[in-house]
Amino acid sequence: MTSLSRSEALSLFAISAAGVAIISNAFQGDGNPVVASLAFSGIAFSATYAMIRWLGNTFMKAGLKGTDMSKLRKVEIPETMGAVCAVVYLLCIIMFIPFPFYKDIVAATSGGGNKDYIQEVHHVETGRFLHRFPHNKLAAYLSAILSLQSIVILGIGDDLFDIRWRHKVLIPAFASVPMLIVYFVDFGVTQVVVPTPLQQYLGDLFNLGWLYYAYMAAFAIFCPNSINILAGINGIEVSQSIVIALLILANDVLYLPPFTSYPHPATDAHLFSIYLLLPFLGVSCALLMHNWYPAKVFVGDTYCYFAGMVFAVDGILGHFSKTLWLLFLPQVFNFVYSAPQLFHIVPCPRHRLPHFNARTGLMEPSTATFRKPPARPVQAVLKLLGELRLLQVKTDNKGEVVECSNMTLINLWLVWFGPMREDRLCMGLMAFQFACGVAGLFVRHRLALLVFTQDNL
Amino acid sequence: MTSLSRSEALSLFAISAAGVAIISNAFQGDGNPVVASLAFSGIAFSATYAMIRWLGNTFMKAGLKGTDMSKLRKVEIPETMGAVCAVVYLLCIIMFIPFPFYKDIVAATSGGGNKDYIQEVHHVETGRFLHRFPHNKLAAYLSAILSLQSIVILGIGDDLFDIRWRHKVLIPAFASVPMLIVYFVDFGVTQVVVPTPLQQYLGDLFNLGWLYYAYMAAFAIFCPNSINILAGINGIEVSQSIVIALLILANDVLYLPPFTSYPHPATDAHLFSIYLLLPFLGVSCALLMHNWYPAKVFVGDTYCYFAGMVFAVDGILGHFSKTLWLLFLPQVFNFVYSAPQLFHIVPCPRHRLPHFNARTGLMEPSTATFRKPPARPVQAVLKLLGELRLLQVKTDNKGEVVECSNMTLINLWLVWFGPMREDRLCMGLMAFQFACGVAGLFVRHRLALLVFTQDNL
């Protein structure tokens, strides 16, 4: 199916028309950028939905296609559709640039654009000099877009050329360079607030210096890769990203009126986060509708990198990366749990996605087989994990471990709750992601006072 | 050949090592950003040269390959190698961001980075506030990178999906959006200096308003597309870009000491141009060495768009787009000359590249055949062009035009100077491009006084 049905076309047109109407009124009077951002998200949703449908065949013809291994009928479907999402998203946040700065432009040029401003020949060369304009916020916003564009270029390269795993991991590191450099040039704060128990040793603020840049780079490497390894079943990459984005949004809203009175130092940073996330939700929902079980398109590594990078720039430039770790708990767990296979202590098959049982139509844990029995200590740990129900372990009659389930959160979920259909599996994991995130936010805002003198809310 | 020879590897390593040494010393004392930019260009050259060699097979495997029609032996060679250039270039100018602003960072934080700056808890949320930092220049630089990244993403899409001609033309329009929006938000000057004869009617300055944005968009659409249609023989896309870049550089140097005393309002704009062009020359030279006759790789539409966009952002953000038109004279001529075929007044075959005569090994003008005789006035114009030696026209015994040479500058060159080998043809056209550009710059700086009160030099 490569064209839109009549009702789809009408709905998308209605959403877009409403969006255009709202945006064209945003510059009248006291336009609210959040409303404009919502309108952009609606248009982004419609455009992505339509383009994924229209471009399916084009992608297949260019060789961007794959086969779904977890279905009875093995048909080829388009791959790398995350690139469509990403391009629509980028265009949206670029078009959005003037909106958060509209009031500042008016204020800086003394009301009504440039009209009352006395212009001299000199200014034609040097531009207007806006003392009151929040230039550093503009630079931060631009650097976010630069990093996102970089990850899209590199992600498309990865999907095209099948880059090796050990090189892939570093793609987000390259993409984070523009953000870190602009942070260095224009913001440059590397102090962090010291937790109360340590203040007697370190003072209120501690200057991390270049370590702070290393931390930001590590964070930017973690987010995209962690989404990329919690993958393999229909819809999971997109739905985990949507859940995380919704939880960040919930956290952002806490810094806006009526929850916080307006001139709060963190309000602008959280508004910035909202502007980045709303269109992301728009394009992701459109993609999910095509990628949900049974998937009609695949998202590609491009989407995983892109989604992770949206969260990374959001957390870093919004100054709430500590909070973001709490929303990534299932991903952190999945990474730590995967480590023995990623570092080849336990054999790692080419694909670790769960096994599709064609007879029952259900997903079952996939397994890694030991060609020779592993070393004693490894066996002991594996058996302990088996006792704790954190792994499915099979031993031979001599008591030696010969097989274990692949170490991913997805397989573990199947070990816990037994075989289930692909969409139930995805929904279960998303409920888990959501529950972990809500608990994390509760800890962040209720228990932070134990180690810091104030919740910055 | 997919690996570097020993002498190639040694030379590239030497260039890179020298570059790294220079850059690591750039922050000591009175480092000169132009020297750092030169060093970056050397590294960019080495990286591009090596990567084009290494990635050839990878590109072929991903289906990015094509056959050279103007050779006796038809072998497939890698296509879209301009994407490698562009990615290396982007990484370079992103890494370069701190260099032009180094002195400003030091000045704004009262000497020696952040050390003496008294930092309050408040600043951890809001960043340092740098009154003296040239924020608007940083935003302009970032917007240039955004536009270049956009054109690379869209150009790769074009090379992958073979987009239709009438959609292709608009790719640069999309890519110019970030530059125009940041111009609107942060610079906003839409006044132009009025030529002397018109000043009595319009005043010294005339506010073009939104027309100025339309002009910039048109310029950004013209540059990439004009390079993309002056194409089709080995090396021509890259060498015309190198000639234009060298001429812009020559013009930039006129605004630096010793030619101009330092605090000149346009100096910074021309330094900006130099920072963009030096690494461009680096990556382009590396590409040319692989794309020169007989070509071992093709550059792809990505390169043409990318090169044109470098010139467009350079001219627009450096405020010398009028001068740039003079350096694009052969491209303007080629576009006007092509118009009858582009708009289908004269039949337009799928490819208009010159015809390779396998017997002589030389290039000859390719032709368009009229299936039915064209209308009277068209015939009259074609015959007139034929008389003026601006077209090769063939008539049947009734005097009706049945065939004419394809309307491109490349074919016209062959009409003028007879069949020649592909590399001689390219060199001739480049000499022409260079001569036109030098004449254009002469007009710009010597004759501009006839219509403006002062040469802004």
Image (cartoon, coloured by chain):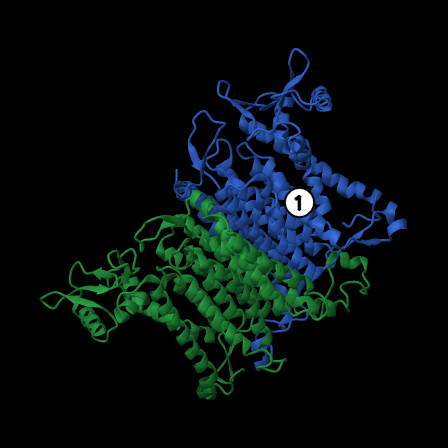
Chain colours: A blue, B green
Q: Is residue B123 above or below residue A435?
A: below
Q: Secondary structure at mark 1?
A: helix
Q: Horizontally, is B269 left or right of A131 in the view?
A: left
Q: Is residue A361 left or right of residue A176?
A: left
Residue A337 seen in the current view: yes
- What residue is shown at x 70% (from left), y 65% (from top)? B27
Amino acid type shown at disc 1: Ile
The image position of residue B135, as x and y in percent, is: 65, 67
- Which chain letter goes with mark 1? A
Position in image of residue A162 (x %, y %) = 51, 41
Which residue sits furthest left? B398
Would you say A57 lies left or right of B345 here? right
Of residues B10 and A288, which is closer to you in this image?
B10
For image coordinates 35% across by 69% down, the residue present is B428
Q: Image quarter for residue B41?
A: bottom right
For the residue pair A83 and A5, the one nearer the viewer reads as A83
